[in-house]
Each structure stands twice: as C-alpha cells, then as structure tokens.
Amino acid sequence: MERTLVLLKPDCVQRRLMGKIIGRFEEKGLNIVAMKMMQITPELSKKHYAEHVNKPFYPGLEAFVTGAPVVAMIVEGLEVIRVMREMLGATSGLKAAAGTIRGDYSSSRQMNLVHASDGPEAAAREIALYFRDEEICAYEPTLTPWMKAGDE
C-alpha cells in the first residue's frame, strides 16, 4: 500500500467542509491511518514549503496556512498519490473539473482546500514532518475484500 500526506487547509476547516471531503476519501475506499487537527507554525510552514520560501508569494502562503487550524492525515491505498491528486483536481479551483473536490468547492488558486503530496519522496518527507511513527494506526478494514481484488 502506498501512503500520502493530506492536509485539509485552513479554508477547508473554516468553511466546515472537513466531513464532506473526508467522506469522499472513504467512499473511494482509501484508508485513513493517521489524523489530527493542528496549528501549523511558521517554522513548520517553512519546512513544508521549503522550495517556495524565497519566492515572492511565500509570505502570503505562510500567512494563509498558519492562519487557522488544519487537519493532517496519512491516507493509504493503491496508487493513492495519483488517485488523491486526481480526486482533488487542478490546483486552481477555477480550472479544476467539476466532480473533483476543488472543482466542486473552490474558486481560488491559493484557497484550494486540500494539499496532497505530489510523489513518493514528497509523501515520505511530508509524513515525517507531521507524524511520528507511533501516531500511525495501520489496519485492514473488514470490507477490503469488497473494495479490491485479492491480487491488487
């Protein structure tokens, strides 16, 4: 099973869309193996968005992501990184297709509700920023045989 970090961003929390979005992940058959509500600090923001810290838009990004709580999750599933990013849609809610999370709920580039890791290396790095090993509760849902074939 592959894992990815997912953040329900401050706009998602403030707009009270957490349950709807988590429900979409569960309906897809993805497994949430860790989850917590937290406040991102400026220090954590700089580590998470290290590649953007020196870009002109970074101060606004940091102010946004530290402005209210987020819900951090580790989501597990087959090809979960690709699947999650397809479920989210294009970065800008204005360009995201209808039926995607951003296409259905966002009309902004920055306030796009959800972050998901963009590859295996990023997922491993980001998961380590937000979770300790003992916070991960790996389990096999009893309905797994009804969600995927045994050889998948």
Image (cartoon, rainbow, N blue to C red):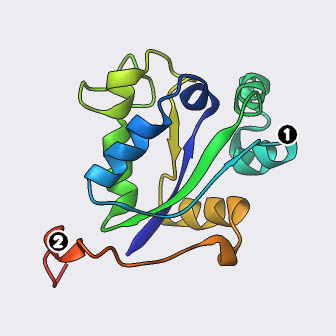
- Element marked by disc 1: helix
Which residue: 44% across, 15% down?
107
Q: Mark 2 points at which residue?
A: 148
- Element marked by disc 2: loop
Mark before the other along the chain sequence, 2 or 1: 1
Estimate the x, y position of residue 32 in percent, counting from the top left.
45, 61
Which residue: 74% across, 47% down?
50
Q: Mark 1 points at which residue?
A: 42
User: Which circle marks residue 58 in the picture?
Assistant: none
Mark 2–mark 1 Cα distance, whole angstroms, equals 41 Å
Amino acid on which disc 2 is placed: Lys
Pointer 1 local density, CA inside 10 Å: few below 14, some 14–19, many at least 20? some
* Residue 90 located left or right of residue 35: left
Would you place residue 70 above or below residue 130 in this image?
above
Pointer 2 local density, CA inside 10 Å: few below 14, some 14–19, many at least 20? few
The one nearer the camera, 81 or 58, is 81
